[in-house]
Image (tube, rainbow, N blue to C red):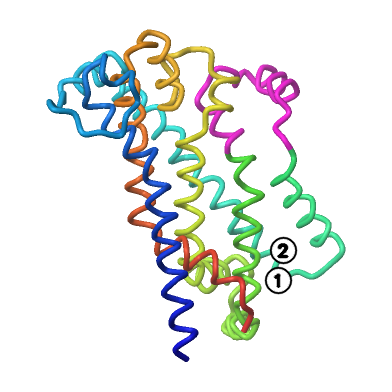
Amino acid sequence: MKKIRRQNKVLEIVLWIFGLLLLIPFLLVVLTSVKDSQTAGLFQLTLPKVLHFENYKVVWKEGQILHGFLNSTVIAVPMCALSLGCSALLSFYLARVKSKFSRFLYMFIVMGMTAPLSIVTTFQLLKSMSLLNTRLGVILVQTALEIPFTTFIMVGFVETLPRELDEAATLDGCGPYRMFWSVILPLLKPVFVTTLILAFLDSWNDAQVSLFFLSDWHKWTMPLNVFRFYRYYQKEWNYIFGSVFLTTIPVLIAYLFGQKYIIDGMTAGSVKG
């Protein structure tokens, strides 16, 4: 027993060390963002003698931060709603209906987790539908990329729910749609919150889809705003790191408040019973 406790203590110390190492890049960004231009170019993990918080005024004004926040939000929120709504319905069907077609459909959808985005065909498709250089086009592309992962997570969770719930709902006169909304969907809360947070993080951090399918910089999201800001302040690393830090704030908030749900939801479907 003492040996197991000692091993757990050593493991805990090792994990703390790795955790602190992972914080070093973030700490470097924060410290560099409040330095002057000359000191910031040294990329040293030291506290400046004078904290230049006025750097954020320049970043906020010249970096179009509010504009980028709005664009990212307008894209991320509908994408999360669409991907989670479609995945929840798909997971209910795939987990409950056992047939050759459902197994084929499940494998086909899950393959989307490994299949790369076809830029040329997607570009032509959006162009033919007059969705190129529109936020709606980006929302639909991101939704298509997110559905395989969210469906994979939700199917594993739905399969852990006892079928007796379905039978009881059927005896009470519930059809499949009412059964889903009244019985299954409320039970999906842990995995639903998990996939919601992960989908939001994926959308907020995405730069590839917006870069290829949005040519108007006024519609660019926060990651592309950082890229645009870098073009004008290539040597002003204090401003660039300030822009990076402001971009990560929503991601940090979402993760800190949702980390419990992420862990619970990811492990909820790992054990059946």
Question: Residue 19: x and y, percent?
Answer: 41, 54
Quarter of the image for residue 50 reads top left
- Say if the magenta span includes residue 128: yes
- Say if the magenta span includes residue 266: no
Identity, as a three-letter code, of the amino acid under mark 1: Arg
- Name of the residue lying farthest toward the left: 50
- Name of the residue lying farthest toward the right: 100
Q: Quadrant of the C terminus?
A: bottom right
Residue at 36 percent of width and 29 percent of height: 244
Residue under circle 2? 94
Instruction: Give the class, few, some or many, for how many residues have Cα within 10 Å of label 1's Cα (few <14, many ≥20).
Output: some
Q: Nearer the viewer, residue 55 or 102?
A: 55
Residue at 45 percent of width and 36 percent of height: 204
Instruction: Give the class, few, some or many, for how many residues have Cα within 10 Å of label 2's Cα (few <14, many ≥20).
Output: many
Identity, as a three-letter code, of the amino acid under mark 2: Leu
Question: Residue 119: x and y, percent?
Answer: 70, 24
On the picture, is 238 further left or further right than 183? left
Quarter of the image for residue 93 reads bottom right
Q: Nearer the viewer, residue 95 or 202?
A: 202
Residue under circle 1? 96
Vertical arrangement, residue 51 with respect to residue 124, above or below: below
| Magenta residues (range) | 116-142
Q: Nearer the viewer, residue 236 or 171?
A: 236
Vertical arrangement, residue 87 with respect to residue 185, above or below: above
